[in-house]
């Protein structure tokens, strides 16, 4: 179980707060709103990187919540995810960094790669803010509420 605090993030997490907590972002502007309070990764990513020989388990890439059967990367900005009493609002894509290679050398190229047309593809999950807090437990169903159209694709936050 994890406790999510409205407007802050995961209780006790280093990235919880109203403003950015990631070192590089704090260095640029410490008063920037924290759009990265909760990190979600789709379970299917672990299967994908396993095809390239990497073993990754839930929680090892810094995510707070692991989903299954949900196209996280295809959600539009502003999608609300209801998990039990909790409401998360999706803000954008996680932009993975070199630290992933410290976990397993070469893994960054598996989660941050280029398509055949040369576009950057970010596969390391999505970021969200806590719009309504509460406790989330393993196995809680996730209800997806897309925002009104027009929908905007996720970009790195």
Image (tube, helix red, strand yellow):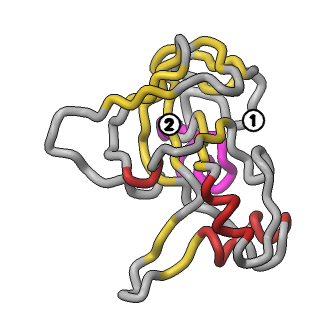
Q: Secondary structure at mark 2?
A: strand
Which residue is more in the foreground, 93 or 71?
Answer: 71
Q: Residue at x 39, y 29 (%)?
A: 80
Badge 1 or badge 2: first in the primary sequence = 1
State the image coordinates of residue 130 (x, y, percent, origin top left): 51, 24
Q: Is residue 12 above or below residue 55?
A: above
In-image side of 48 versus 149 (left or right): right
Q: Is residue 136 above or below residue 134?
A: below
In the picture, residue 133 is in which quadrant?
A: top right
Kindly identify which residue carries mark 1: 14
Q: Quadrant of the N terminus?
A: top right
Kindly identify which residue carries mark 2: 128
State the image coordinates of residue 93 (x, y, percent, origin top left): 48, 53
Which residue is more in the foreground, 143 or 104?
Answer: 143
Q: Residue at x 35, y 35 (%)?
A: 79
Crowding around mark 2 (Cα neighbors within 10 Å: few <14, some 14 to 19, many 20+) is many
In-image side of 64 versus 33 (left or right): right
State the image coordinates of residue 63 (x, y, percent, origin top left): 68, 44
Q: Residue at x 48, y 36 (%)?
A: 33
Q: Identify the magenta region.
A: 20-35
In the picture, residue 6 is in which quadrant?
A: top right
CA gap between label 1 and label 2 equals 15 Å
Is most of the magenta stretch helix, strand or loop? loop
Residue 76 in magenta stretch: no
In the picture, residue 139 is in which quadrant?
A: top right
């Amino acid at each position: 179980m994890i406790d999510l605090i409205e407007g802050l993030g995961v209780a006790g997490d280093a990235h919880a707060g109203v403003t950015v907590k990631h070192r590089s972002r704090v260095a640029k502007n410490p008063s920037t709103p924290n759009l990265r309070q909760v990190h979600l990764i789709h379970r299917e990513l672990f299967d994908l990187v396993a095809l390239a020989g990497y073993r990754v388990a839930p929680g090892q890439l810094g995510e707070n919540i692991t989903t299954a059967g949900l196209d996280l990367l295809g959600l539009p900005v502003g999608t609300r995810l209801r998990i039990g009493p909790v409401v998360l609002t999706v803000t954008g894509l996680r932009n993975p960094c070199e630290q992933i290679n410290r976990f397993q050398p070469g893994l960054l190229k598996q989660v941050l790669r280029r398509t055949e047309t040369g576009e950057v593809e970010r596969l390391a999950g999505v970021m969200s803010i806590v719009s309504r807090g509460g406790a989330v437990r393993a196995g809680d169903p996730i209800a997806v509420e897309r925002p009104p159209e027009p929908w905007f694709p996720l970009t790195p936050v």
